[in-house]
Image (spheres, coloured by chain):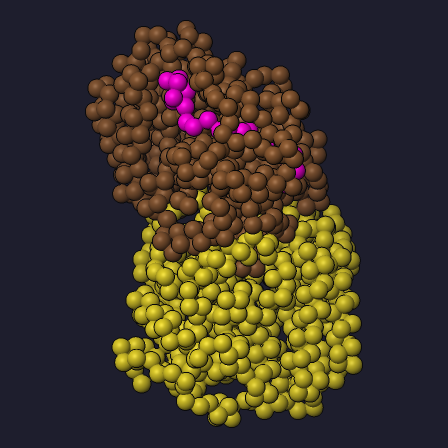
Chain colours: A yellow, B brown
Amino acid sequence: MSEATTPRTHRTRIRSWWGWGWADAHPDDAECIATGALVPGTLARPLPLPKVADLRIGPPAVQAPRSLAPLVTADPEDRAAHAMGKAFRDVARALRGRPGRIPDLVARPSRDQDVADLLEWAGGHGVAVVPYGGGSSVVGGVEYRGDAHRAVLSLDLTAMDRVLEIDTVGRSALVQAGILGPALEDRLRPHGLTLRHFPQSFEFSTLGGWLATRAGGHYATGPTHIDDFTQSLRVVTPAGTGTSWQLPASGAGPSPDRFFLGSEGTLGVITQAWMRLQERPRHKASAAVAFTDLRAALEAVRAVAQSDLAPANCRLLDAGEAALSGASRDGSAVLVLGFESATAPVEHRLARAVELARAHGAVTPPGGTGPGTRPDAASDAAVGAWRTAFLRMPYLRDGLARMGAVVETFETAATWDRIPALIEDVRREVGAAAQAATGHPAVVNCRLTHVYPDGAAPYFTVVAAGRPGEEVAVWDDLKAVAAEVLHRHRATTTHHHAVGRDHRPGYDRQRPEPFALALRAAKNALDPHGILNPGVLLDA
Amino acid sequence: MSEATTPRTHRTRIRSWWGWGWADAHPDDAECIATGALVPGTLARPLPLPKVADLRIGPPAVQAPRSLAPLVTADPEDRAAHAMGKAFRDVARALRGRPGRIPDLVARPSRDQDVADLLEWAGGHGVAVVPYGGGSSVVGGVEYRGDAHRAVLSLDLTAMDRVLEIDTVGRSALVQAGILGPALEDRLRPHGLTLRHFPQSFEFSTLGGWLATRAGGHYATGPTHIDDFTQSLRVVTPAGTGTSWQLPASGAGPSPDRFFLGSEGTLGVITQAWMRLQERPRHKASAAVAFTDLRAALEAVRAVAQSDLAPANCRLLDAGEAALSGASRDGSAVLVLGFESATAPVEHRLARAVELARAHGAVTPPGGTGPGTRPDAASDAAVGAWRTAFLRMPYLRDGLARMGAVVETFETAATWDRIPALIEDVRREVGAAAQAATGHPAVVNCRLTHVYPDGAAPYFTVVAAGRPGEEVAVWDDLKAVAAEVLHRHRATTTHHHAVGRDHRPGYDRQRPEPFALALRAAKNALDPHGILNPGVLLDA
């Protein structure tokens, strides 16, 4: 096996082939049982860890030609690890031994020409190509469904992981698409620079994945979406390769970059990008405040979002979410506020934000008794509890999956006037659907991940007992109910998780028809054989 | 003549059919002569004002069907006023009695269905449709060139000029595309809100025009481009009408709005939009500082742009531009700094910005003697002089045109590392080309209109004597030389003026080929008869 085809490990740790993140970070059986005990109706013992051998992966349906052979592997472990992303739906299928279609081959190109050659070969042989970055898709974005193609190639970009150039004058970097978040930041740190883009998947996702899916970073306001950090893209398509100019801004026609951002591997493969960087923040301050009433909390958040305070963090946790993460234990909603700056202290901005929150009824700290209390150690503890839970959450989800629970997270965005009723309806209707499907009460929590002057992005977590062996069917039902509620409230199908295959029903109804026509025509022009990520965003 | 077909006047003032702005604001002969005297080699007396009657406009080549007749006029004055935009090239052609092809008909739809009906009729009859807002294009965006179509219809959107809805909770408004800048702000002002988008053409351009051309506002940093204010668009295309959802943000596929923003009337007609609004600023402060050295000034501006100060104005005028506007008389470059906020005083931000400028060698006020001087009345005067000149400039250009001068303004954007050499090369090469073409020395001035952490947008003004009767040819030559320099420096063809027909050579070379394929395919799908603004952005 050549170096290019060795399953890649990072810092000697092994990625889980079936679940989130590092294999060694998965909850053990005892932790699964303890977590499962919190969800009525789950199993008594965890489902066993799935084994690749049990999948009985056969030989690939195609062989790569000799010229491409060094880039390609048919190793079963590698193919299994590239069969799906990391949605609950994917984990549940792996646990039940029914993963999506296993790709026939995994390719790891190391340069643009490799990508072009692979696309050319695939186009000529009816082979579907599924671009693959960190594999952290939670929307069915990196698998193949159906049987319209003779074979499936997973195009793993992680061998293209170099920072090619850093411009310290204009603060930007030319970066290959396959780099993972931590490696990118490691390279930028010595220059005092950062991309400052930290999606929850940061450790396990790539620049190319962020670009292809219009990822949202951790920060609540200001530049946080990958779109805003993009100066230039190189895209390899079956119809040729193109590179947009590296520019701070341009008004020359519709933005070429904005057309490929969010194209989710259906129009071409993003292989490198010039990205805007920032100075690393030196000043930070954060605090948590609590609200007894969610509507008042929403008004407070709107006031902060419509001020010029620009908090780095402005994360509102409803009572359930705050309790789950340990940020509050008394049924309060908690607002975590954080400020950062590379150049100036931020305490006064934090103070003004806390003041605004108090004017809308906030008490500080969470668990405190009134508006007179300053943020203090209890507030710090709430902030810390939330952060820890945030990163551990996906692992716990997999633990719950092993206990036969159904866990779903979905997110959206809507204008402020729609937010309160949207949150209420999602809770009520998805909760009722979960109860009906499983016979047990479900948890439906909400937080706001991003806030804007004109609206917010609510993020929902649903935890319910499953029906043994039918977890995927239950998940699909809940997903459909959620999509209906979002559609009725004109809340977007996805704010930052992407469309993939799982969100197609909502997306197809949301997308304006003239744009659908344009997108289909562009797809046919760039991908005439219809090999690029078939089924994502649109049908061939 | 029905109300819909009455040539529209505004506040009882009449728009010039051949030149910039209000007819009654044009320089009189004496002012033309005085201005012309500043440019060696111009005429002794101004060219006469052009008359529509001299154009001998014939009957239209087509008649609208009875059902559309109430929307359409063949009035010669109206047709002449819709024949071209307001580039120097357009004014010079009018002055020499050789305007572009006169449209056969001018239509003023008052609702989406009118637009759809007009497009349907035009598609079936080989009639080119040129969408027309305020008519302020300086890139040949609102005329027809060539003879591939049987007739030309100018589609004037200014009868669709209503604000349909204002959402004070989320601060947004649903606005028809044909509204002019002042009318829009008049409607928003009673709510304490503003779009805060003030391109130089503000009085004479429409929301739809801003959207179709990705207009840049007056402000130097932060949200200033119309793209960033757009929540949702309605677009009427020959293949159907679509409306994107009104959202604060979305990650559902490539942005539909970003695809139609900048499409310059080639893919569809934008008829209305939900726009983000802001609270009206209550706190303002500005100051001017001077530099003896432009390179030092550029470093100062970069430092300000890379800070978190976010000035509303950060306009660097080179020595020539500063002298022309009266902002400085001693050969200094002048930096005009301005801050605005709806919520908090801004003096400390201004002070920090002035401090940064001083650290890079600025003296205050312009004409002052050293870094110890605080901004004062002389600084205010420099700011005021610049503002007045800014709004008067297009009228003076037309005065110079009547004196046979050639005047061109073009703008671009590039990353910081490219800016100093770009400015030097434009000055030297365009200056030399002007001298060679006219036998007289030319003025080539530069200012920065917008600044970004990663680059800036230089704006150039060229004033030269013409060759009598060949002003357009000289202008075309200078334009070609400028395009070459921009291309060599990888500076965008246009930062906010748009591509139109005049910038096609530069745009065609800049646009990545896969995106060109996608755009052409989309154009064919949305506009199968090739009637929409033919020749703009791409060929049919």
Q: Is residue B105 highlighted in magenta? A: yes
Could you tell me which residue is drawn at 50 percent across and 63 percent down? A213
The percent position of residue B499, horizontal first and vertical second, equals 41, 39
State which quadrant residue A317 falls in. Answer: bottom right
Q: Which residues are magenta?
A: B93-112
Residue situated in front as seen by the camera: A328 or A2:
A2
Could you tell me which residue is drawn at 31 percent across and 61 percent down? A164
Residue situated in front as seen by the camera: A270 or A88:
A270
Q: Is residue B170 above or below residue A23?
A: above
Could you tell me which residue is drawn at 78 percent across and 77 percent down? A436
The percent position of residue A82, horizontal first and vertical second, equals 46, 79
The percent position of residue A30, horizontal first and vertical second, equals 63, 88
Residue situated in front as seen by the camera: B104 or B539:
B104
Residue situated in front as seen by the camera: A294 or B176:
B176
Residue A299 visible at all: yes
Q: Is residue A270 highlighted in magenta? A: no
Residue A175 visible at all: no
The percent position of residue A387, horizontal first and vertical second, equals 59, 67
Question: Which quarter of the rendering shows the N terminus of chain A?
Answer: bottom left
Q: Is residue B152 above or below residue A507?
A: above
Could you tell me which residue is drawn at 50 percent across and 23 percent down? B59
Side (left or right) of B98 relative to A417: left
Side (left or right) of A461 relative to B335: right
Side (left or right) of B284 relative to B409: right
